[in-house]
């Protein structure tokens, strides 16, 4: 059974990093704030928790095969 996104679930959001490379893409904790009626494409709205503040994303796509992809979300790895 695959996991389904729902409001309140904690996921990872992969940041873009900076164009000059000062900051590399990195995983950030995020909370799902909205799930569209049709989650066929697995896009969700997120509140991303950054060290310097919050970022809110609408229609953030899911990373294929849970491979960290800048600008996408994925399930946290199991430990």
Image (spheres, rainbow, N blue to C red):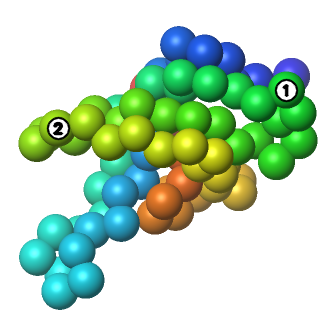
Residue 56 vs residue 69, the one in the foreground: 56
The residue located at (59%, 48%) in the rendering is 60
Quadrant of residue 25 within the rendered picture: bottom left
* Relative image position of residue 41 (x, y in whole percent): 82, 48
Please, is residue 17 above or below residue 52 in the view?
below
Q: Quadrant of the N terminus?
A: top right
Q: Secondary structure at mark 1?
A: loop
Q: Can residue 66 be seen in the rendering of this structure?
A: no
Q: Measuring from the top left, give residue 18's x and y in whole percent.
A: 22, 74
Name the quadrant of the C terminus: top left
Query: Could you tell me how far apart the alpha carbons at marks 1 and 2 are, in whole angstroms?
Result: 29 Å
Label 2 packing within 10 angstroms: few (<14), some (14-19), many (20+): few
* Residue 37 disc label: 1
Position of residue 6 in the picture relative to residue 10 (left or right): right
The number of numbered discs placed on residues in the rendered structure image is 2
Taking depth in this image into account, of 58 and 69 the one nearest to the observer is: 58
* Picture disc at residue 53: 2
Q: Nearer the viewer, residue 1 or 5?
A: 5
Marked residue nearer the N-terminal end (1 or 2):
1
Quadrant position of residue 35? top right
- Give the left or right position of residue 8, taking residue 79 as reference: right
Residue 4: image tag: none
- x 42%, y 53%: residue: 14
């Amino acid at each position: 059974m695959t996991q389904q996104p729902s409001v309140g679930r904690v996921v990872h959001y992969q940041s873009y990093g900076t164009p000059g490379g000062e900051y590399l893409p990195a995983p950030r904790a995020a909370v799902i704030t909205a799930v569209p009626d049709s989650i066929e494409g697995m896009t969700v709205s997120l509140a991303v928790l950054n060290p310097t503040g919050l970022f809110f994303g609408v229609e953030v796509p899911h990373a294929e095969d849970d491979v960290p992809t800048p600008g996408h979300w994925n399930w946290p790895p199991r430990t």
